Amino acid sequence: MDGLIIFSAVLLIGSYLYAAGRTGWSFLRMFSWVLGILLAVLVMVGPLAEQMQRNFISHMYGHLLLGMLSPLLLVLSAPMTLLLRTLPVKYARKVSQLMNSRYVQLISHPVTALLLNAGGLWLLYRTDLFMMMHHYTWLHYLIHFHIFAAGYLFTAVMVEIDPLRHPYSFKYRSIVMIVSIALHQILSKSFYPYPPAGVLPEQAQTGAMVMYYGGDIIELTIIFVMCLKWYRSVRPGKRQFAA
């Protein structure tokens, strides 16, 4: 599986850079994509991945990288925008049709994205699922894929770097973001009296601090991006500048 993950990462990085090179894409976006992929690989392959199996504190660092920081970096690289710009018109239309499908509209609703992201974490840490994933390899990879995918979906819906068919208002997304932060913080604090299954109390408490404060930093970054994008959309003189 490690080989497949590394191969997929190389393919994703190579494809993105090739497409970006054809369009004069921003260097910062290219850097963001490469770093986001590398962080995800770091969590799944290598010393950190092995340490995460034995130590809850390491697991929490991995959670922040795989479920929050890596998705944020990938979202900031605007992969869907790049894809639509570089695909032939015929295939770009098919991708657009897929993005406009009812299924995509359902999962890209802010509340749905919130449930998949925060709800998945509550299910993982407040049930025996956390212990089970250390005994079943397929479940281990499935859960980590969900953490990554749900984190990407939620971040993409919140910041709206890539265009959405039915964008939601800044106010609506802000409310959902506040709820997400609250759920994340309540979950981390719950580790003090009720550690996840199979986790030592000392590790649970330190892991809770990593989740709480590390999550705050990344969530504040998401809020900053949301506010910056909103400000640019309403700032005085926008129309004159755009013209």
Image: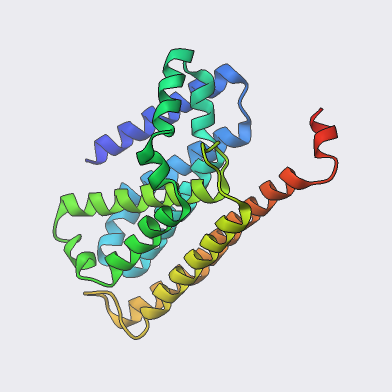
Q: How is the image coloured?
A: rainbow
User: If the image is split into quadrants, where does the N terminus sit?
Assistant: top left
From what the image shows, is residue 209 above or below residue 15? below
The furthest residue to the left: 136
Residue 88 visible in the current orientation: no
Residue 222 position by quadrant: bottom right
Q: Position of residue 163 (x, y in %)?
A: 55, 36
From what the image shows, is residue 224 above or below residue 74? below
Q: Position of residue 79 (x, y in %)?
A: 50, 33
Q: Nearer the viewer, residue 74 or 205?
A: 74
Lateral position of residue 96 relative to residue 103, left or right: right
Residue at image x 30%, y 60%? 51
Residue at image x 36%, y 56%? 116
User: If the image is split into quadrants, where does the C terminus sit?
Assistant: top right
Q: Position of residue 147 (x, y in %)?
A: 35, 54
Q: Nearer the viewer, residue 15 or 231?
A: 231
From what the image shows, is residue 64 above or below residue 210? above
Residue 151 visible in the current orientation: yes
Residue at image x 63%, y 30%? 26
Report the number of discs: 0
Q: Position of residue 148 (x, y in %)?
A: 37, 49
The furthest residue to the bottom: 193
Lateral position of residue 47 relative to residue 184, left or right: left
